[in-house]
Amino acid sequence: MKTTHRLFTPMTLLQTVLLLVGGAGSTLKGQGKNVYLVYVGTYTVRHSQGIYAYRFEARTGRLSSLGLAAESTSPSFLAADPTGRFLYAVNEVASYQGKKSGAVSAFSIDRHTGRLTGLNEVSSSGPGPCFVSLDKTGKYVLVANYDGGSVAVFPVLADGRLGEATSFVQHEGSSADRERQSGPHAHSIEVSPDNRFALAADLGLDKLLVYRFDPAQGSLTPNQPDSAMVRGGLGPRHFAFHPSGKFVYLVSEMGSAVTAFSYDGASGTLHEIETISTLPKGFTGQNDDAEIAVHPDGKFLYASNRGHDSIAVFSIDPAKGTLTPIQDVPTQGKTPRNFSVDPAGSYLFAANQDSDTLVIFRIDVRTGRLTPTGQVVNIASPVCVTLVRAQ
């Protein structure tokens, strides 16, 4: 892939005009709490140019395009800060400024129009960054470098720009699969609900690592114990905390499974409860899991299957944390990568990477079941979906 040192560029005058006037690109001001900006990160290898924006009215379920919000090189994963003022993207490339590294880009958000303005970019401290998140204060950005097998923390400056890394940890080791797990592959990192710990899923190590996070210094130090292991060859990818803070759910890419852990928030320790398949009985094809999310009310869990091309739906036992399969829903496309659930828990947005579509499902808040709304949006190589409340 050819890359340049400048990974984002300002919007053209024409793009700005399209966002500000007429039709789907009209201003969002005064639309109320039920209007969201939906940002989609992409791989810029097949007709895509960067991050795309949409306007979503939760009351009507209507999604309309706002066009290209910012030009950027393979902004595969996105995260918005808690205030909705800034958006951060990992540029999933292998080389940046002549070094083996990807980049992290910072943007300011115009919550009236959806426009993104590039602020700055920094090295991700390792090649192939694939995940970005923020701590609960919005003062630090955390990044997982898949190819480099490392995690890093970056300070957010007063104007939203990123400073140089305040912490960097290189993972070490391997696991059962000699081809895919010969070394570490950090796949995600997020802080705990109380902002005291950071958990990192590493596909190459079959571990969910636990770090103590210092929100004053932006530092990571290994917890004791420093990790929870899963069965060899599962390949951990992403995880989600239960709203109660009592459970953590880890989706494993290679093993097509979800592992439920009990979580002790005081000590940051994890204990496995169960591991359950995300695939229906009888399926024998190739599959790699991708994303996981817990419904805002804590009653349901969702996980995406790439190969079976579906969203697996589970109910959650509120006392035990165990899972019961209740539905497998086709995503109406190929290779569902990331998906997002809106804050009210009424809709799920699924990004089908290899069929170039974003598909919207309505969530039955009583049963957790998904029903397609009929809305299918064409977008090249969608990877990540992030919602920001509009003004």
Image (spheres, grey):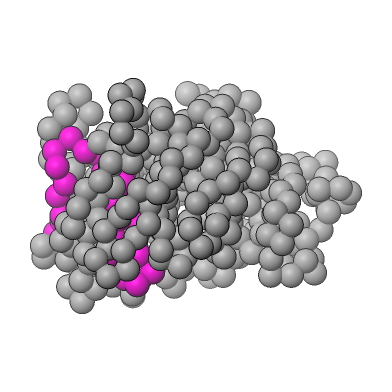
Q: Residue at x 75, y 47 (%)?
A: 64
Q: Residue at x 58, y 59 (%)?
A: 346
Q: Residue 227 colored magenta? A: yes
* Whether residue 240 can be seen here: yes
Residue 75 seen? no
Horizontal and vertical percent position of residue 388: 61, 60
Q: Magenta region: which residues?
A: 226-253
Give left or right: position of 227 versus 99: left
* 42 lies above or below 121: above
Examine the rendered structure and indicate whether residue 179 appears above or below residue 50.
above
Q: Please name whichever residue, 352 or 84, is drawn nearer the observer in this view of the structure.
A: 352
Residue at image position (14%, 42%) is 231
Up-down relation of residue 46 to residue 379 (above or below): above
Q: Nearer the viewer, residue 239 or 119?
A: 239
Q: Position of residue 276 (x, y in %)?
A: 25, 46
Count of all numbered marks drawn on residues in the image: 0
Residue 251, position as x, y percentages in the image: 31, 46
Q: In this rendering, is residue 234 above or below 354?
A: below
Q: Specify whether residue 390 is painted magenta.
A: no
Q: Does residue 133 appear to the left or right of 381 in the view shown?
A: left
Occupied quadrant, residue 47: top right
Q: Quadrant of residue 194?
A: bottom left
Nearest the camera: 48 or 24? 24
Q: In the visual, does 338 lie left or right of 224?
A: right
- Residue lying at the far right of the rendered structure: 22
Task: Look at the image and tell me in which quarter the C terminus lies.
Answer: bottom right
